[in-house]
Image (cartoon, helix red, strand yellow):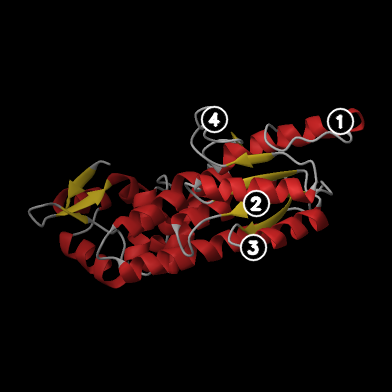
Amino acid sequence: MSGIRTMSAAELLGVSPRALRDWERRFGYPKPRRTPAGHREYDLAELEPLRQALMEAHSVSSAIELARRRGTRPSSPARLVEAFGLFDESMADRVMEESLAFRSVERSVEEVLLPAVEMAVERTSWEAESKFAFNWATGWLFAARRAAPPASHVQAIVLLDASAHESVESLRVLALELALRRASMHTVLLRCALPPGRVTSAIRKIDPMALVVCGGDVPQGTVERLLRAVRQADCGAPVYELGEAEHPSGTRAIRSVGPGSVDATRQLRTYAVKRAELRPRAHGRRQYATG
């Protein structure tokens, strides 16, 4: 990311260095970085929309609001982390809005939201900030889910969530659920921690088209327990796993649908289409492990 010092930034905007420092204090914009020596360094991608806005607006406050609203610089996980560090919900919302201007919802989640929360969690001194990040991200994902279109598939895809409470992996599960719902897929989320008998009972009632084990590195014992529950339900639905890659032969009885929600949704939609085409011929077959 290119940057310039205070004097050059002031010249570019046609104001004094003192005015720049005053805007930072009053409006928090433009927001300079600090060099190791403590000098202010301004982002050129932030200064350019402000320069244009200053020529159009009647006041500094209006120009700054206009520049912020335009959001011409690409949003990034780092900018979202900056919002988390300031406990600034409005700024976090604005970063995602900027991302949505040139990324899909799914890509914005995978490329901006999830990496930013992961970065916040990895900062050891950020206990409060990471909690804020998780709560904000959860709320954003739920709001986006409510805006998803109605499901066009009657049968559901069951997500078997093995993630820890309030973890990045739990957000990845919500991201997959959001992506599937935006693809007009019916989804049901179940916790892997449910007793096997309850899992079996739920699967019988739901009669899903497929199941996906998700939530991080799921222990082999948990996977085997879930497969038994599916077999006992006698629903005939294939079981997949959300992960980086397929496990070596013999260590897992299920396939991966990809590392993230975008790949997984694409594969599951393809499966749903093929299933609809082949359903009359495939009626009665059992596909527990291979999909």
Q: CA distance from mark 3 to mark 4?
A: 26 Å
Amino acid type shown at disc 2: Leu
With 154 as the anchor, is 127 left or right in this view?
Answer: left
Image quadrant where residue 212 sits: top right
Discs 1, 3 touching: Cβ within 8 Å: no
Residue 237 screen position, x and y as percent: 76, 41
Q: CA distance from mark 1 to mark 3?
A: 31 Å
Q: Which residue is mark 1?
A: 282
Q: CA distance from mark 2 to mark 3?
A: 16 Å
The image's mark for residue 195 is 3
Circle nearer the N terminus (2, 3): 2
89 vs 216: above or below: below
Image quadrant where residue 66 sits: bottom left
The image's mark for residue 159 is 2
With 273 as the anchor, is 181 left or right in this view?
Answer: left
Circle nearer the N terminus (4, 1): 4
Q: Which residue is mark 4?
A: 250
Amino acid type shown at disc 3: Pro
Q: Residue at x 47, y 64 (%)?
A: 166
